[in-house]
């Protein structure tokens, strides 16, 4: 009797067009998301995972006949842990995609696993140029430091900034920012003095002092997202904010998430970035409305957009292949993929798997009572200039 009931129930579900339970398990596609959800870098995990969830909330989980299931792993920003979690995701959970990666070293740790298991891995924050060489299965939805630093150098030269002190943390991504800015700036006739500060105990005073002594007209600063408060305090203390010098750099230091806590000292800073909350487009307005519904008290930043677009890359890969194939098929589907993101048009470079996108020049302003990075110029569809160097 019971067996007949179960059979009838299964038949009923199938006739109604519902997938039978045994087919359901098979039609799941797992995406292993590895991010720092705890520890000093937990804000990176918070923002990217919010972007991933927002995409699924708005678009559902079914693409190409498959249902996406997220398996979340917290690597605390520690590469050894990333490696262990990535291996477990592949072996135990049999994920079809990997995603996340808050830092270049954690992404590097997962690279051999993505390559050996032939699982596409979407890099959602890590931003060194060379990272894409670490695995042919990497695809980037974030940005690269050279991609935003070179336009910054170009803009500075065209706007009469000729002597610059650069200050970056002594880590791969900081060095990428410094080198790409300096090379472009020097090639255009500018002079540079470069200072690197410790990542864990940064002291900005020597760099600020040099900028005063050499009467620099620009101070180029890269500060990883969420960490610029300490620099800003020393900047104000140095008195440099009061001289003619321009504060310039990648947008990370004035990220939408924490710009208000920095205060009006950043008004007038010129930064280059691929995303500002104030980007004027319908796609961005819709994105912000959806984000605000889920998180009324927060502002979406470039990391939320990266998680959101990275999830869309996976969804589109499944949709355009009818969910059929394997890692290599889905990787091929992502190469050359293009769509309108909240940041503007984006494309995955089919040759490098890196992202091609607009880089905006923004001025920090107080607008309608809040601090915003207001776009006033654009370098359209910039490829990562670091490739092949
Ligand atoms: C990186 O390690 O690649 C990284 C870290 C923080 C950022 C951007 C990139 O804000």
Image (cartoon, helix red, strand yellow):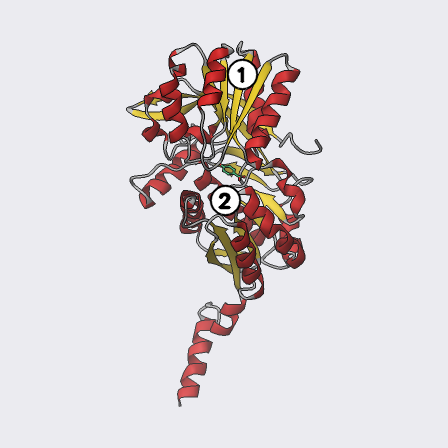
* Quadrant location, the N terminus: bottom left
Looking at the image, which residue is at 33% across and 39% down? 298
Residue 115 placement: quadrant: bottom right
Looking at the image, which residue is at 54% across and 33% down? 170
Q: Tell me the element at label 2.
A: loop
Residue 10 visible in the snapshot:
yes
The percent coordinates of residue 16 (x first, y second) are 44, 69
In space, the residues marked 1 and 2 are separated at their CA atoms by 29 Å
Task: Tell me: is circle 2 under 8 Å from ligand 1.
Answer: yes
Q: Tell me the element at label 1.
A: strand
Q: Is residue 336 left or right of residue 339?
A: right
The relative height of residue 185 versus residue 33 in the rendered view (above or below) is above
Name the mark on residue 164.
1
Of 100 and 245, which appears nearest the observer? 245
* Quadrant location, the C terminus: top right
Cβ–Cβ under 8 Å for marks 1 and 2 = no
- In the current view of this chain or complex, which residue is farthest to the right? 388
Residue 267 visible in the snapshot:
no
Of 81 and 207, which appears nearest the observer? 207
Q: Is residue 155 left or right of residue 55?
A: right
The percent coordinates of residue 354 (x first, y second) are 62, 39
- In the current view of this chain or complex, which residue is farthest to the bottom? 1
Q: Which is closer to the viewer, label 1 or label 2?
A: 1
Please name the residue that numbered disc 2 is placed on: 102
Looking at the image, which residue is at 54% across and 21% down? 152
Q: Is residue 362 left or right of residue 233?
A: right
How many discs mark residues in the rendered view?
Answer: 2
The relative height of residue 18 versus residue 241 in the rendered view (above or below) is below
């Amino acid at each position: 009797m019971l067996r007949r009931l179960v059979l009838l129930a299964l038949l009923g579900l199938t006739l109604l067009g519902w997938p039978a339970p045994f087919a359901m398990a098979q039609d799941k596609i797992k995406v292993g998301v590895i991010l720092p959800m705890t520890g000093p870098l937990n804000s990176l995990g918070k923002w990217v995972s919010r972007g991933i969830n927002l995409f699924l909330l708005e678009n559902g989980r079914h693409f190409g006949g498959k249902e996406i299931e997220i398996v979340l792993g917290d690597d605390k920003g520690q590469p050894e842990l990333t490696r262990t979690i990535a291996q477990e995701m592949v072996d135990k959970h049999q994920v079809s995609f990997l995603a996340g990666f808050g830092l270049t070293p954690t992404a590097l740790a997962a690279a051999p696993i993505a390559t050996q298991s032939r699982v596409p891995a979407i890099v959602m924050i890590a931003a060194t140029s060379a990272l894409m060489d670490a695995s042919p299965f990497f695809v980037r939805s974030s940005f690269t430091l050279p991609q935003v630093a070179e336009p910054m150098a170009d803009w500075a030269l065209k706007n009469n900034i000729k002597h610059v002190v650069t200050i970056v943390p002594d880590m791969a991504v900081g060095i990428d920012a410094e080198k790409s800015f300096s090379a472009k700036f020097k090639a255009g006739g500018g002079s540079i003095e470069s200072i690197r500060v410790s990542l864990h105990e940064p002291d900005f005073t020597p760099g600020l002092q040099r900028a005063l002594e050499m009467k620099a007209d620009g101070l180029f600063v890269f500060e990883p997202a969420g960490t610029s408060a300490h620099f800003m305090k020393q900047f104000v203390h140095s008195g440099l904010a009061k001289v003619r010098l321009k504060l310039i750099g990648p947008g990370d230091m004035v990220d939408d998430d924490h710009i208000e806590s920095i205060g009006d000292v950043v008004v007038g800073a010129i930064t280059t970035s691929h995303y500002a909350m104030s980007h004027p487009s319908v796609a961005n307005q819709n994105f912000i409305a959806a984000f605000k519904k889920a998180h009324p008290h927060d502002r979406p930043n470039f990391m939320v957009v990266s998680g959101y677009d990275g999830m869309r890359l996976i969804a589109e890969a499944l949709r355009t292949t009818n969910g059929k194939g394997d890692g290599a098929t889905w990787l091929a589907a992502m190469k050359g993929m293009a769509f309108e993101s909240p940041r503007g048009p984006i494309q995955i470079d089919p040759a490098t798997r890196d992202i091609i996108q607009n880089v905006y020049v923004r001025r920090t302003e107080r607008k309608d009572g809040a601090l915003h990075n207001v776009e006033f110029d654009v370098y359209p569809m910039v490829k990562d200039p670091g490739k092949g160097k």
